[in-house]
Amino acid sequence: MNTIQVIAKGNVQGVGFRAHAKLRAHQYRIKGYAKNLQDGTVILEATGSPDKVEKWLAKIGKYPSSSTELKVEVIKNPTVDKGFRVL
């Protein structure tokens, strides 16, 4: 299993970005969460097989447009339990 943390910047709040991340998470059987931060960014944490996490990341990186910037960080101690949640 692989766990990553993603910071999404750009046009990511109020445009369905978290819902899109959740939909794609279900598609790839990813567990984790997506949460809006007060500074306008979205933080996501995802756990799954390395190939599925990679595919999920590629899908969410294309939404909603090229104005979305993703900063990816690998997490050593996952905090995820079940499903993919929007917080």
Image (cartoon, rainbow, N blue to C red):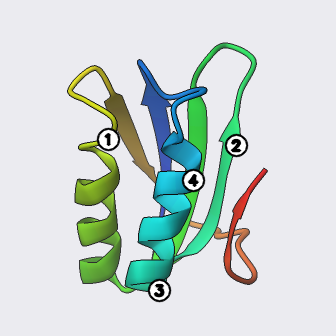
Do we see residue 75 in this rendering? Answer: no
Q: Position of residue 21 (x, y in %)?
A: 48, 56
Residue 35: give its label. 2
Tag 4: Cα neighbours inside 10 Å, few (<14), some, or many (≥20)? Answer: few
Instruction: Tell me whether the residue at label 4 lies in contact with that at label 1, contact meaning CB atoms closer than 8 angstroms.
Output: no
**Residue 29: mark:** 3
First-in-chain label (3 vs 4): 4
Asked if residue 50 is positioned above or below residue 22 in the image, the reply reads below
Is tag 3's residue or tag 1's residue first in the polypeptide sequence?
3
In the picture, the disc for residue 21 is: none
User: Tags 2 and 1 in contact by the CB under 8 Å rule?
Assistant: no
The amino acid type, in three-letter code, at marker 1 is Tyr
In the rendered structure, which disc, 4 or 1, sits on the residue that comes first in sequence?
A: 4
Q: Nearer the viewer, residue 5 or 44?
A: 44
Q: Are marks 3 and 4 in contact (CB under 8 Å)?
A: no
Q: Amino acid at mark 2?
A: Lys
Label 2 crowd bin: few (<14), some (14–19), many (20+), radius 10 Å? some
Of the two numbered discs 2 and 1 on the same chain, state the one appearing first in sequence.
2
Q: Is residue 13 left or right of residue 8?
A: right
Label 1, on which residue? 63
Residue in the image at 75% along x and 81% along y: 81
Q: Nearer the viewer, mark 4 or mark 2?
A: 4
**SS at mark 4 in the image:** helix
Q: Nearer the viewer, residue 2 or 82?
A: 82
Lateral position of residue 11 relative to residue 81, left or right: left
**Residue annotated with mark 4:** 19
The x and y percentages for residue 25 are: 48, 72
Q: Is residue 47 above or below residue 21?
A: below
